[in-house]
Image (cartoon, rainbow, N blue to C red):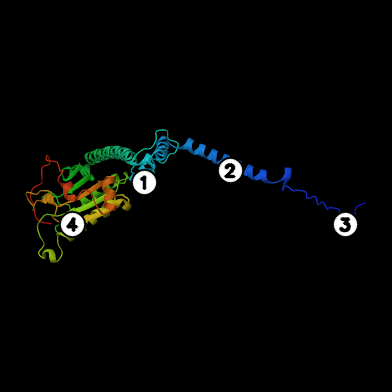
Amino acid sequence: MSDDSTRPIVIKRKKVVAGGGHGGAWKIAYADFVTAMMAFFLLMWLLGSTAKGDLQGIADFFQNPLKIAQQGGAGSGDATSILQGGGKDLTRQAGQVKQGDVDRKSTSFSKEAQAEFRRKEQERLEVLKAEIEKMIEQTPQLAQFKKQMLLDITTEGLRIQIVDEQNRPMFDSSSADLKPYTRDILRQIGKVLNGVNNRISLAGHTDAAQFAGGEKGFSNWELSANRANASRRELIAGGMDDSKVIRVVGLAQTVLFDKNDPLSSANRRISIVVLNKRTEMAIMQEEGPESEVGAEDTVSDKLNLPAKGSAG
């Protein structure tokens, strides 16, 4: 019988597989699968919500990527767009649209809307003109001054001019004090003007006769401005809201009514303009499109000018 000390010792080692049938390796595989599916569905959503022009740009990029490197731009699909990427609506089916085309359509629509607004505003001013003319005809204290009240439509709006006559001035000589009948005229006009939403501009005018002190002292500038402001007060006394007045100016003899005779009494007048919206906005921005000089040139040729008179 052999000695136990010489018997070989056999050591059995069991190979352990990490995780075995219930390990965590499958979780990693599943996570990769879910990530891939999420990326796939995200890709499908992007392809479904992208315009045809963008899809064409993506296709062109993969077919010829050097084109972008050579010509620049975010993609060949919008290489000709004024704004990169074309329109803003990703659901459009017509592909990309040049922003310039959109701007031109918007501008065209805006011009049409503005033209329609101006047409309707012109109609309202024509109605107001007819209303004032009817008021003058039907009011005995105004009918006698009909020849001194001139109404016309200008580029600024409806202009109402009250001019002097040789024997019937609106103000005392060389003064801003109104005659009683001038107060009646202005107050009647003030009642009518308060019924419209338009703002009002007033301008005072004189003839070319100068004061003894000349331009160094009290002059036609001060006189015309004072007369315009006095007229403003009478319009308000007649019931017109004072907030409707946007401009009161004195123009002295710079804008003559009768250019052939600077000393004519017709040059002494008050201009009340019911402003259209375009002129009102221009005044608010201090860059009027039309000057008082341009507006004065639209006076009807049919008007018989009053006789010549003295200065002031």
Query: Helix, strand, or loop for circle 4?
Result: helix
Q: Which is more foreground, mark 2 or mark 4?
A: 2
The image position of residue 163, as x and y in percent, is 16, 49
Q: Would you call the spot at circle 1 few (<14 residues within 10 Å), some (14-19), or many (20 or more)?
A: few
Give, as a three-letter code, the residue at label 2. Answer: Thr
Total residue callouts: 4
Q: Name the residue under label 2.
A: 35
Please indicate whether residue 197 sits to the left or right of residue 33 in the image. Answer: left
> Which residue, given by chain and number where applicable, does mark 3 sit on?
5
Single out the residue that lies furthest toward the right. Answer: 1
Q: How crowded is mark 4: few (under 14 residues within 10 Å), some or many (20 or more)?
A: many
Relative image position of residue 116 (x, y in whole percent): 30, 37
Name the side, left or right, on which 94 lies relative to 264: right
Distance between mark 2 and mark 4 Cα atoms: 84 Å
**Label whose residue precedes the other's in the sequence (2 or 4):** 2
Residue at horizontal 62 percent and vertical 44 percent from the top: 31
Which residue is found at the position 42% from the left and 33% from the top?
Answer: 93
Q: Secondary structure under badge 1? A: helix
Label 2 vs 3, first from the N-terminus: 3
Spot occupied by residue 159 in the image (x, y as percentages of width and height): 21, 45
Query: Comparing marks 1 and 4, which lies closer to the viewer?
Result: 1
Q: Which amino acid does label 3 sit on?
A: Ser
Q: In this view, does 43 lie above or below 293?
A: above
Quadrant of the image containing the C terminus: bottom left
Residue at (54, 41) in percent of width and height: 39
Secondary structure beneath label 3: helix
Q: Mark 1 points at which residue?
A: 69
Which residue is more in the foreground, 115 or 154? 115
The kind of residue tagged 1 is: Ala
Mark 1–mark 2 Cα distance, whole angstroms, equals 32 Å
